[in-house]
Image (cartoon, rainbow, N blue to C red):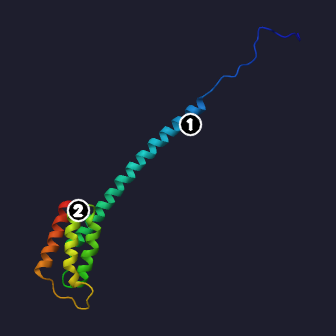
């Protein structure tokens, strides 16, 4: 019984690529999940920045002109936040800044004149159109 059986062949190694396929499938699903997560976070970020702009616009609309120095600084700050990439707003903002210069950097600032109010209202109107 110690004779070798010649009909039985030795075990053959079968190539198994299931691990490679598994890694590829996991990579594809992870890529899709990361892409969807990116889109979700981007949409949340855009909503958040829109809300920030709306809050800043409300503050800009409700400027108290009783203290002209403080109002001019506040308009400068809020205008910069709301400017964005619109060239028209940037030009009007720069014009408004030049008009507001006479109220800044002084101990006592004069009362607001009509030219300043017109420029301020123009800035508010243009920013409102862009939102």
In this view, 77 is above or below 5: below
Residue 61, percent across and down? 19, 71
Q: Which mark is residue 101?
A: none
Q: Nearer the viewer, mark 1 or mark 2?
A: 2
- Measured Cα–Cα span from mark 1 to mark 2: 49 Å
Compared to residue 69, the image places residue 46 above or below, namely: above
For this rendering, which residue is in front, 73 or 43? 73
Task: Give the quadrant of residue 117.
Answer: bottom left
Q: Residues within 10 Å of mark 1 (few under 14, many from 20)?
A: few
Quarter of the image with the C terminus is: bottom left
Q: Is residue 27 above or below residue 65?
A: above
69 vs 119: above or below = below
The picture places residue 130, in percent across and down from the top left corner, at: 20, 60
Judged from the image, the secondary structure of the residue bearing numbered disc 1 is helix
Extreme-bottom residue of the structure? 107
In the picture, the quarter occupied by the N terminus is top right
Q: Is residue 35 left or right of residue 75?
A: right
Residue 84 appears in which quarter of the rendering? Answer: bottom left
Residue under the point 71% across and 19% down: 12
**Residue drawn at point x = 37 percent, y = 53 percent:** 42
Q: Earlier in the sequence, mark 1 or mark 2?
A: 1
Q: Give the residue at the far top of this rendering.
A: 7
Image point (23%, 81%), residue name? 101
Under tag 2, what secondary structure?
A: helix
Give me the residue at 22% from left, 84% from top: 103
Q: Which residue is mark 1?
A: 23
Q: Which residue is mark 2?
A: 87
């Amino acid at each position: 019984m110690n004779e070798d059986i010649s009909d039985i062949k030795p075990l053959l190694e079968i190539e198994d690529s299931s691990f490679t396929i598994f890694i590829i499938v996991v990579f594809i699903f992870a890529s899709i999940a990361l892409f969807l997560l990116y889109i979700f976070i981007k949409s949340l970020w855009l909503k958040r920045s829109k809300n920030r702009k709306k809050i800043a616009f409300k503050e800009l609309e409700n400027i108290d002109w009783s203290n002209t120095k403080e109002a001019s600084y506040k308009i400068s700050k809020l205008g910069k936040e709301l400017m964005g990439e619109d060239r028209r707003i940037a030009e009007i903002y720069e014009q408004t800044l030049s008009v507001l210069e006479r109220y800044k950097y002084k101990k006592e600032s004069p009362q607001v004149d009509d030219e300043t109010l017109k420029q301020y209202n123009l800035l508010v109107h243009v920013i409102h159109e862009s939102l």
